[in-house]
Amino acid sequence: MNKLRIAVIPGDGTGPEVTTEALKVLQAVAALEKFQYELEHFDYGGERYLKTGEVLPEGAVERLRTFDAILLGAVGHPDVPPGILEKGLLLELRFQLDQYINLRPVKLYPGVETPLVGKGPADIDFVVVRENTEDMYCGVGGFLKKGTPDEVATQTAIYTRKGCERCIRWAFDFTRRRNNPKGRRLTLVAKTNVLTYGHSLWDRTFQDVAREYPDVEADYNHVDACCMWMVKNPEYYDVIVTTNMFGDIITDLGAILQGGMGVAAGGNINPDPGGCSMYEPMGGSAPKYTGQQVINPIAAIGAVAMLLEHTGQPAAGARVLQAIQAVTGTKMKSQSAGKMGYSTAEVGDLVVDALAAVR
């Protein structure tokens, strides 16, 4: 088998710290599962922007496109105005590399606290499939009479049949592969009673595609109802498919249900042949903790598990996930920064040690 080629963007703040631990685990599981990989590091992020004035240099996207996957640490720098790095790096890569699936497992690990009283790992275990290249994030809009009392601002949501269908179809296929023993259910989350154009397109496309998947229950929630039921009965959900904007919101709610941003990982996926996908922890760069070795690397290690699962090494990915759960369930005191009972590097070491004991 060819070497797995991974581009690494450690990024800003504590991003390099958690990335170091993720790569430590990657090295260990590669030795155990006997596969080869090669890394190339890129310095894209806040420090580079402050030095050069550019977020991504010319040719960066085309170079990244040649890799099998990208591992991202974190983006966000206190000296860089909000929006510059997020749009210039995160959104730029999602759009240019056509990473049209944002995949967010919402899984409560053993030993991790959830704010939902009486709920445990068996209750919080679902996946959100978020469309990742349309909606409000297309940047269509503008200002009229900016800075005056008569200012008008527009922000236009863009939905296409192609964009809806490829995301929905992927979600149905994923639900089938996930094969939940409790039953295969795909829930469309939208707001068809108010957003009667774009979300009508989503609903009609969902119903059309559902006919091809009679073995999957096709379900629907308004987004406000979904937020209530995620808190009241998270065990109801198997897979959710939703729009870019709503997905951005409900996945943060999901992260809190599963114990916080320190454990939440996600993938920006181009599932087409030859597509390059990007995997990352969902937490930010947490600059106030930089260099203190107190930040939780579990989400970054989980991002490596997802990367392996979706780039031809599913056994290795499953092994990393099992090791994570062994560590959260038997070792760590908390998932909060500075309260884990271990340093960032020590948590990475614990996962490495756990890899040898799981299959």
Image (spheres, rainbow, N blue to C red):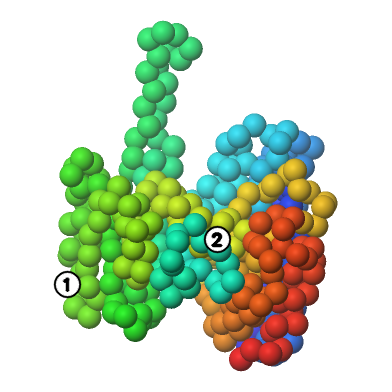
Residue visible at 59% across and 81% down?
A: 322
On screen, 112 above or below 190?
below
Residue visible at 37% across and 74% down?
A: 174
Q: Quick check: can you spot residue 338?
A: yes
The residue tagged 2 is 259
The residue tagged 1 is 211
Quadrant of res 123: bottom left
On the rendered structure, is 281 left or right of 172?
right
Identity, as a three-letter code, of the amino acid under mark 2: Gly
Residue 188, how many percent across, how many down? Answer: 27, 59
Marked residue nearer the N-terminal end (2 or 1): 1
Q: Residues within 10 Å of mark 2 (few under 14, many from 20)?
A: many
On screen, 147 above or below 128?
above
**Which label was assigned to residue 311?**
none
Q: Residues within 10 Å of mark 1 (few under 14, many from 20)?
A: few
Name the one closer to the observer, 13 or 274. 13
Q: Quick check: can you spot residue 30?
A: no
